[in-house]
Amino acid sequence: MERQKHIRNFCIIAHIDHGKSTLADRLIEKTGTVSMRELTDQILDSMDIERERGITIKLTPVRMKYSYNGEDYELNLIDTPGHVDFTYEVSRSLAACEGAVLIVDATQGVEAQTLANVYLAVDNNLEVIPVINKIDLPSARPEEAIREIEDVIGLPAEDAPLVSAKEGLNIEKVLDKIITDVPPPSGDENAPLKALIFDSYYDNYKGAVCLVRVIDGCVKAGTKIRMMHNGKEFDVTEVGIFNPKPIEWHSLKAGDVGYVCASIKNVSDTEPGDTITDALAPAAEPCPGYKKVQPVVYCGIFSTDGSRYNDLKDALEKLKLNDAALFFEPEVSVALGFGFRCGFLGLLHMEIIQERLEREFNLDLITTAPSVNYMVYKTDGEVVTVTNPSNLPNPSETDRIEEPFVKAMIFTPPEYIGSVMELCQDKRGTYINMVYLDKTRVRIEYEIPLNEIVYDFFDNLKSRTRGYASFDYEIKGYKAEDLVKLDILLNNEICDALSIIVHREKAYARGRSIAEKLKEVIPRQLFEIPIQASIGNKVIARETVKAMRKDVLAKCYGGDITRKKKLLEKQKEGKKRMRQVGSVEVPSEAFMSVLKLDDK
Amino acid sequence: MQKQGLYVHIPFCRSRCSYCGFVSCTDICAAEKYVGSLVSEMRERAGGEADTVYIGGGTPSVLPRGLLTKIVGALRENFAISENAEITAEANPDSCDSEFLHEARECGINRLSLGVQTLNDCLLARIGRRHNAEQAYRAVRSAQKAGITNIGCDLMLALPEQTEKDVVYAVDTLASWGVKHISAYSLSVEKETALYNSGYAPDEDRAADMYEAAYGRLKAHGFERYEVSNFCKAGHQSRHNLKYWRLEPYAGLGAAAHSYNGTVRSRNTSNISEYISGRRGEVCEQTSMSEKLEEYIMLGLRTKYGVEFSKLNALFGGDWLKAKAREISELCEGGYIRRSERGITLTEKAYFVMNSVILRLI
């Protein structure tokens, strides 16, 4: 127990841009964990994309040393992803801590995502330490931020440290607060081993590496461990801590945060939320809160160059090594050929994977419109889940279709209330609640089908509120709705990759705008191309791409053939980016462009 | 040995037209020195027979008197120019005066290519041309009087504010003047020209409408389309230009001039002062068999003669027809190409959209 009194396990909760990574960097710097020379900005965000976007996806814990009142303490910072897609991962990280530092931007106040994660922290019985950041900015209004924390979240915040992570101002006050306010861990070193996995990653040499918080007991190299939910057993080869780079350690005991390697080949055997115990002396019960992670958003991913199917497969497999939440299975599209139906935790997760595939694996992708998981109740009593619109059973065999709903929480300045509500209504939302947080901010809650969220809700919200609104959602459940499959026909043939599932009432408008959009992006070809949107056999919208009338190289002046050839070659290159759908050449952008439709 | 064509580039103009992206300069004082460099280049590259000569530009008619004679003289000294050679000079109506014509006639020019572009004076001014319709008329008449009756005129289509009526009027009028050859080019707006900077982009449908209008009138006046943009009275094809489309050899002399010897394509520096100082800055590019095949299809299909299977097979090094069987049958079915024993030609409707056809065949 004496040892644990000098340990503090905490995480940082913040809205995107509120300075989480910067504060983490300052804490690391202040405690001398990393020498100044090694310190590059935002140490914890190890992926390029994270750094560029300024968001954290993967959790990287770090152990720091700090002296307070003459005593040495060991602080374990467990970084959390700040995005709704990773709510479950956040909840597991929170479960590994006793305290949370809540960063609130002095210029912006409390945001939707912050709130969702603070509630998670409170649910996990964490001591929440509010910190007001960016006080160096001229527009900072720390008193208002403090009042908001007290009014909106209900946390006392009068003695919250006022800091500037960027300028390194008052950082030690945060560290002091962590020591004084966050309770030390109180596990039993002698009890059977119980270690919570809050994340894992794949290492080429060590295999899957579990990031754990030891609750009770002790683990070291040689321990035979068992994953309590998964049931699999492994022999521990190495344990260690993060400094912030992994360093091998003799053992991890109750209260410690570190990693465990056990020649585990597959990250899917190291699920966040699972509990590691000693196979020979197992704990009676695992840590609470385990959930099997299920994808909520799906889309088809194809390589623009159809011959690179195998490269795409390899790339997905490599990403999957590090990302147990990524789901994929082969899919064949008439229009796009061989590819994969992929499942993601949310839209950001989807975007990140797409971006990593393109960037890290140098692939050119065609992605189809995102879909959600529909539950189709057939007349014969069978229930099927559908993630690809093309697989939707025939309406004559369908009793009803249920779709997932979310509770959406939107924070906005009051002048945009009308506009935000209009958007929510338009997205088939049901009003739940609206609360004035103060004169300048309102919280609006709606229940909205996820299907509507995955289209263009966020972009639309941002543009309607000039970027002032913030937004978060959680899945609430399923409801039966009047949903139909909307098909797009190019030159009288269905292009399966463009089919979507949509509410009947919205089908007309959506069909019309998709047809209009396609007319813009499909280039004129030798013959006229009708573009039709249909439900079943009923055509509900039609546009026409007129036949091409001029496609000829200009005068070849003075025998300059080379230039002509180059022009033609450029045109040929352009054709390579086209997909042959029946007789029609469709540019790969076309499949993406229907994702971003302006509803107005 | 196949007879070659000779191209001589005269990069001088009185002023620059708003659509022009070619290599030219308005400092006509440099012409004397330039012609000196031309003559040296001819000496360097002397030899071989030529049956066509094309003196283009720029504006050859702005050359100070005597220089054209000097150029043609030097050509004859360095190359064996056939008795019946086609010798063309380009001219602009505003500088195509009787002195120029007299000199041209004297030195053996037997074909004139006039940059008429349009006969609408407002349009001419708009695109920065120095002449008007009246001057175009006088140029044609003077040339005919001077004894140069093989006259071709260039017309431009899809100019800003041009109408089909303008096009029809120009074709009808030129036909009535007795010109033998009309080239009708759609304006292509090249980057870094005044027109490009003005933001003008020709509309595809408008360009097609004008082309069809021009084609209709030309046919009515007995002009045959022997290349997508070139029309002539019987026997008046530009023999020189045909060489480009048939992959026949030509030597380009002067700044920015292009040459082709049957395997290597090369071009001289486009920097006029560099050329004058005696540096040709030649850039060569070997063309492979497969490139040659592509060129043959790309260029051959522009003409009414089309492409021949014997030549395609030779360049392909196998049975080209078999390799492209699916494409050919689809294009035949769609009515875009016509297949004969000898080869392939484009159908009427494919001419103005031929890139889509060509891309399927290469």
Image (cartoon, rainbow, N blue to C red):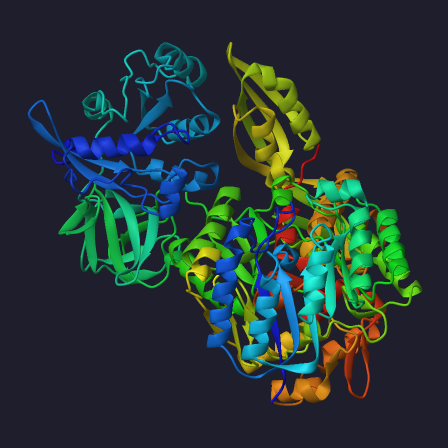
Figure check: A140 above or below B267: above
Q: Is residue B182 left or right of residue B300?
A: right
Q: Of residues A572 and A177, which is closer to you in this image?
A: A572
Rendered image quadrant of residue A565: bottom right
Image spot of residue B91 (x, y percent): 69, 58
Name which residue lies at 34% across and 64% down.
A265
Image spot of residue A386 (x, y percent): 65, 53
Image spot of residue A588 (x, y percent): 62, 56
Figure check: B4 above or below A218: below
Name which residue lies at 71% across and 62% down.
B102
Figure check: B246 above or below B96: below
Q: Is residue A48 left or right of residue B323?
A: left
Q: Quadrant of the N terminus of chain A?
A: top left
Rendered image quadrant of residue A49: top left
Image spot of residue B182 (x, y percent): 80, 62
- Residue lying furthest right in this view? B220
Q: Is residue B285 left or right of residue A526?
A: left
Q: Is residue A211 left or right of residue B97?
A: left
Q: Of residues B332 and A17, which is closer to you in this image?
A: B332
